[in-house]
Image: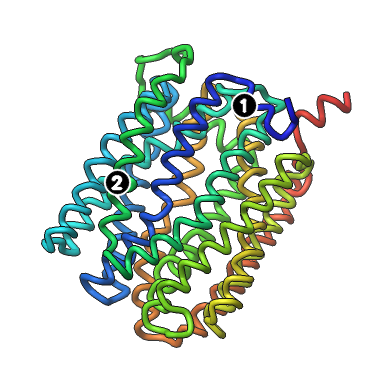
Amino acid sequence: MNRAFAAMGDRNFRWFFLARAITMVTGSMSAIALAFAVLEIDNHPESLSFVLAAFTLSNVVFVLFGGVVADRLPRALVIQTCYVIDILSIGAIAVLLFTGTATIPVIVGLAALNGASTAFVLPAMQGIIPQLTTPEHLQQANAMLSFVRSTVVIGGPVIAGILVTTVGPAWAMIVQVVGWLVAIPVLALVKLPRPAGAGRFSLFSDLRTGWSEFWSRSWLWTIVLAFMLMNAIHVGAWGVVGPYIAKNDERLGIAGWGWVVSAEGVGVLLMTLVLMWFPLRRPLRYGMLGMAAFAIPLTMLGVHPAVVLVAIAAFLAGAGAEVFSTGWNVAMMENIPGDKLSRVASYDMLGSFVVMPIGTLVYGWLITRADPATVLTTSAILYAAIALVTLIVPSVWRMGRVEAAAVAK
């Protein structure tokens, strides 16, 4: 089979890939739909920051337990169960929007429920991929999933922008619900052996084991500490300030914001094609250099939020982010034992997400009291500096591929 699609030779990966593709396609519009649904109820950035903070805070609270569960129970079953919860929470928001009874406090509560569900899905997703394909095909498998994600990100935000401005955001959420309903039986076709120690929980012992694995690797906790701050900047500056500027600055507009997010997806898409063919020999070095590129669209959004300029900058940032995303996933999957991978991933997610609620709240407050250009350009400088300083750590700079090291021997 062609090298770029070698992972498709495994039956389990094919079914997982199909289920994941369905959920990515149908869920690609929901983030933009939710953001503008909130702003439609209350056109104030602080309201949006409350909803995003509730989602992230709930995720942070439950993610460590989610990692333990994903290492001890069949990961496909964990994902299916969480999809049921997502159907209920997203479907409830859609019904409230259709009936005109949606309020910010209710949406905050449902966002928290959705965040708790995601806290179990993400560690399970991280841990299941090495079970579905061979080690030499991990980069291709991750790049293929990123390819689908970026493809739908290109069209999803544009369609979401059109739906929001024509028939309202609730319809985008209905599409997501339908996708989850289809994905659940498809995931049932993934047949994997039960994990070692299945059903035997010792929460604190399992968490200590995961922490030991996490803290013993300097490259791992260095990157997580960096992303603790970088994600807070990203979710605040891009997730809160971005939609607010789009709604209130005619140079960008809601539809224009959809094009900007789609351009970021195009950058991801093209980079995934490259990574499906060419091995990433220094995954963390090139990944953190790629992440620093996000400073470009942040700066443009603040200085001159014109659709074309911000979209070009977002395209470059998307390409850089995909280098990191694939490189990070491969580094984790190659260097962490499979039976502990979900727990280690949960510590990664906890550290990466823990400050995000503060980021959303701080930026929701800042944008109403400070000049947007100053806020965003300062954020861009901080973001790039944090990303680049990680390269000082030898294990980040020198990290190579396990596969490549084995061949060299």
Near-viewer residue (19 or 402): 19
Residue 192, how many percent across, how many down? 48, 15
- Position of the N terminus, as image quadrant, is top right
Find the distance from the CA under tag 2 to the CA under tag 1: 31 Å
Residue 128, how many percent across, how many down? 51, 27
Seen in the picture, residue 364 relative to 193 is either above or below; the reply is below
Q: Which residue is mark 1?
A: 8
Seen in the picture, residue 346 relative to 190 is either above or below; the reply is below
User: Which residue appears farthest toward the right when viewing the image?
Assistant: 408
Near-viewer residue (50 or 133): 133
Residue 108, how many percent across, how many down? 23, 57
Near-viewer residue (359 or 212): 359
The mark total stands at: 2
- Position of the C terminus, as image quadrant, is top right
Q: What's under tag 2, amino acid-wise?
A: Asn
Q: Is residue 191 left or right of residue 289?
A: left
Seen in the picture, residue 112 relative to 347 is either above or below; the reply is below
Residue 313 occupies quadrant: bottom right
Of badges 2 and 1, the one in the foreground is 1
Label 1's element? helix
Near-viewer residue (17 or 58): 17
Q: Which residue is mark 2?
A: 114
Q: Residue at x 55, y 22 (%)?
A: 131
User: Which residue appears farthest toward the front when viewing the image?
Assistant: 166
Q: Residue at x 43, y 67 (%)?
A: 236
Q: Residue at x 39, y 61 (%)?
A: 160
Residue 311 occupies quadrant: bottom right
Type of colouring: rainbow
